[in-house]
């Protein structure tokens, strides 16, 4: 029984390790600052690397990238949600935000998924 308890605890450590950095409802700016302070780096995804792929940025994507958020993967067209990616070593964090104003983008959810 004791071994099972330790196995469950150790399985949760990767998730719990980031819980102090990112919280649902915090601003993206605050989450980003915490991530950078903890050694996380932005991941520039292929989809929005416009110079290399020929993709044209439009709307909120263009505004966000112009403000220096190079970790932006994409924004939904039909709702005000965007995806941002970060890495630390081989670990990744993908943050989904809600909002249309950069200063008010709020963390809606996050996972440890890496972009394709």
Image (cartoon, helix red, strand yellow):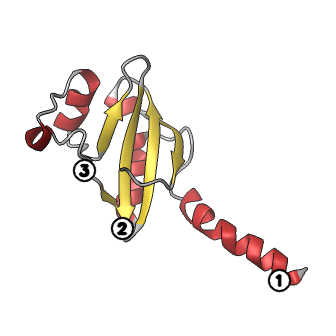
Residue that carries the numbered disc 3 in the rendered image = 44
x, y (%) of residue 55? 16, 32
The residue tagged with tag 1: helix, strand or loop? helix
The picture quadrant where one finds residue 46 is: top left
Residue that carries the numbered disc 2 in the rendered image = 39
The residue tagged with tag 3: helix, strand or loop? loop
In the displayed structure, 59 sits above or below 113; it is above
Q: Which mark is residue 3?
A: 1
Q: Identify which residue is drawn at 41% across, 41% down.
A: 28
Q: Identify which residue is drawn at 37% across, 71% down.
A: 89
Residue occupying the far bottom of the picture: 3
How far apart, in angstroms, are the residues tagged by discs 3 and 1? 41 Å
Q: Residues within 10 Å of mark 3 (few under 14, many from 20)?
A: some
x, y (%) of residue 102? 32, 31
Asked if the residue under mark 1 is in contact with the one under mark 3, i.e. CB atoms within 8 Å, the reply is: no
Marks 3 and 2, the one that precedes in the sequence: 2
In the displayed structure, 80 sits above or below 110; it is above
x, y (%) of residue 76? 39, 25
Quadrant where the N terminus sits is bottom right
Marks 2 and 1, the one that precedes in the sequence: 1
């Amino acid at each position: 029984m004791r071994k099972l308890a330790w196995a469950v605890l150790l399985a949760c450590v990767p998730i719990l390790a980031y819980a102090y950095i990112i919280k649902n409802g915090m601003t993206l700016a605050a989450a980003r600052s915490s991530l950078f302070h903890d050694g996380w780096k932005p991941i520039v995804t292929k989809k929005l690397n416009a110079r290399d792929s020929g993709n044209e940025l439009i709307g909120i994507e263009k505004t966000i990238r112009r403000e220096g958020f190079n970790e932006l993967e994409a924004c939904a067209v039909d709702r005000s949600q965007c995806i941002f990616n970060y890495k630390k070593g081989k670990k990744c964090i993908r943050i989904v935000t809600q909002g249309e104003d950069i200063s008010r983008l709020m963390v809606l959810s996050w996972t440890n998924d890496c972009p394709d």
